[in-house]
Image (spheres, rainbow, N blue to C red):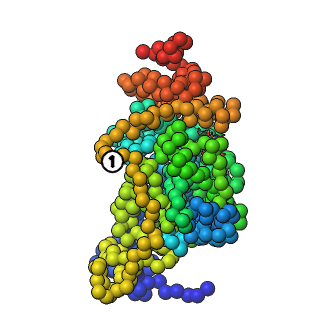
Amino acid sequence: MEQKKLTTAGGRPYVEFENSMSAGNRGPLLLQDYFLHEDLAHFNRERIPERVVHAKGTGAFGTFTVTHDISRYTKAKIFAEVGKQTNMFARFSLVAGERGSADTERDPRGFALKFYTEGGNWDLVGNNTPVFFIKDAKKFSHFIHTQKRDPKTNCKNPTAIWDFWSLNPESLHQVMILMSDRGTPFSYRHMNGFGSHTFSMINKAGEQVWVKFHFKTLQGIKNFTGKEANDMRGTDPDHVQRDMVEAIGSGAFPKWAMQIQVMTHEQVKDYRFNPFDVTKVWSHKAFPLIDVGIMELNKIPENYFRDVEQSAFAPANIVDGIGFSPDKMLQGRILSYPDAHRYRLGVNYEQIPVNKCPYDVTNYQRDGFMQIGDNGNAAPNYRPNSFDNVVTDEQYKEPIVILDSNIGGWFDRNENDDDHFTQPGDLYRNALNDQDRKNLVTNIVESMSGITGEKRNEIINRQLCHFFRADQQLGTDIAAGLRVKIDEKTLAPTNK
Ligand code: NDP
């Protein structure tokens, strides 16, 4: 092995590593021992702010390979032809816990993908669930506060969690998925992923359709029951990180099939739900899944901090041929994700190797903390100018956006969109088997049993009404588990 000299960060070779410089063998240390200062000072700064959400994560590099032609929908270069392979990076995560929290907590799992395409980096920043708890970004920080620690006790607070959910019934669909065994996946390899939001695709002729992205695990779905997940928290809190490192290390590269659902402008107008509402799914029967390609993860980063902790995904990173939609959560995330990265990693976070576009990047952004690129060298840093030859390109223009209304204002997010119960009911009746339903009720009862205080009955009753509206049997079983008496005629709780 090649011998290397131990040096300071500035490159000065160390003459002594084991002992600090001191005045005599037993005397005090000398201020001039820069080797000592540099080591301690760097150590003190090793931690960067953790992500407010999705703090604990697992990352891996891989490839995406096109298996089916979807060029009739999109001109995105990543989908240009069957067989085309694009490098990518994936980061899976838990949402609510801290960087050291246990991997098998009941929580949605983040499913964030970065594709290094010739048309720029495309980030698809989704979850292992096709829906989300809320449909308007204005509610996001409030929702997350309820998932985090109580301001006084510094403990997780089921009262706040269920208070928020019961007051925002649009959360019911995601709550049901979270409380099913899919809320405690066995590993990241054994869960599906979803882009969750509606996006658009634009083809070479400028025609636009609306799409949802699905990633089906080829390892098969495998979940823990609530009890198994709790046991694993004590046995190995890093279970899913270890699972991914070991699987990829042994050559068992996990794979997912990318599929899309497609809706036309006409179908959007006719659909019985608002298709841009992220608390709803699109029926598989009406909008069948279309095969696109295979994602394979095959390399664990050599250094976790460099590539996983410093990775930054943003739904704002779309590419030519893929567009946004009026989904209000997506619109909010376009703003908030890059903003979070600027705070956590600095304004030049796109220059960090894992985030860096491997193709040419040219603009007039300059300076800022941690500028490690060429910073534009001597080229003009203003525009227009008479010196450079940097052009914009009309061919990347997206189709015009036709607005629903020309009235700006604060509209009720649930106006004409207040059926929060049909799809959760369909999930309970059609997608779950008897054992799944039993586990769902057990998990809900266990979680709601943690609601305490003077508002306990009020919160429980309000949430029970939502479960009853989704499915009468579901409501009845949860009420029985919570020992809430129900009036048989009105189905109203009588626990007051
Ligand atoms: P389908 O019967 O065509 O699809 C049912 C879907 O539910 C399948 O994709 C299935 O599994 C998935 N599923 C099974 N168990 C769970 C669970 N515990 N949590 C989440 N998803 C689960 O029916 P529809 O398209 O008519 O949808 C019926 C209900 O299924 C919806 O209301 C929704 O709650 C749920 N669902 C629908 C999806 C969609 O995109 N249409 C996607 C996921 C769930 P798998 O993921 O293994 O394919």
Return the x and y of residue 462 as percentages of the image width and height: 44, 25
Between 52 and 214, the residue placed more toward the observer is 214
Residue at the spot 65% in from the left edge and 54% down from the top edge: 290
Return the x and y of residue 301 as percentages of the image width and height: 57, 69
User: Where the C terminus falls, by quadrant?
Assistant: top left
Q: Quadrant of residue 439?
A: top right
Q: Is residue 252 left or right of residue 86?
A: right
Numbered disc 1: secondary structure? loop
Between 378 and 251, the residue placed more toward the observer is 378
In the image, residue 108 sits, relative to residue 70, either above or below, namely above
Q: Is residue 205 left or right of residue 27?
A: right
Q: Quadrant of residue 218?
A: bottom right
Near mark 1 (Cα within 10 A), the count class, few <14, some 14-19 or many ≥20, is few
Q: Quadrant of residue 393?
A: bottom left
Residue at the spot 46% in from the left edge and 79% down from the top edge: 360
Q: Is residue 385 left or right of residue 9?
A: left
Residue at the spot 68% in from the left edge and 70% down from the top edge: 83
Return the x and y of residue 343 as percentages of the image width and height: 35, 62
Between 407 and 423, the residue placed more toward the observer is 407
Q: Is residue 229 visible?
A: no
User: Where the N terminus falls, by quadrant?
Assistant: bottom right
Return the x and y of residue 77 as percentages of the image width and height: 56, 70
Of the four image quadrants, the one with ligand 1 is top right
In the image, residue 35 sits, relative to residue 346, either above or below, namely below
Residue position for label 1: 406
Q: Amino acid at mark 1?
A: Asn
Q: Is residue 71 left or right of residue 278?
A: right
Residue at the spot 63% in from the left edge and 57% down from the top edge: 258
In the image, residue 76 sits, relative to residue 405, either above or below, namely below
Q: Is residue 198 visible?
A: yes
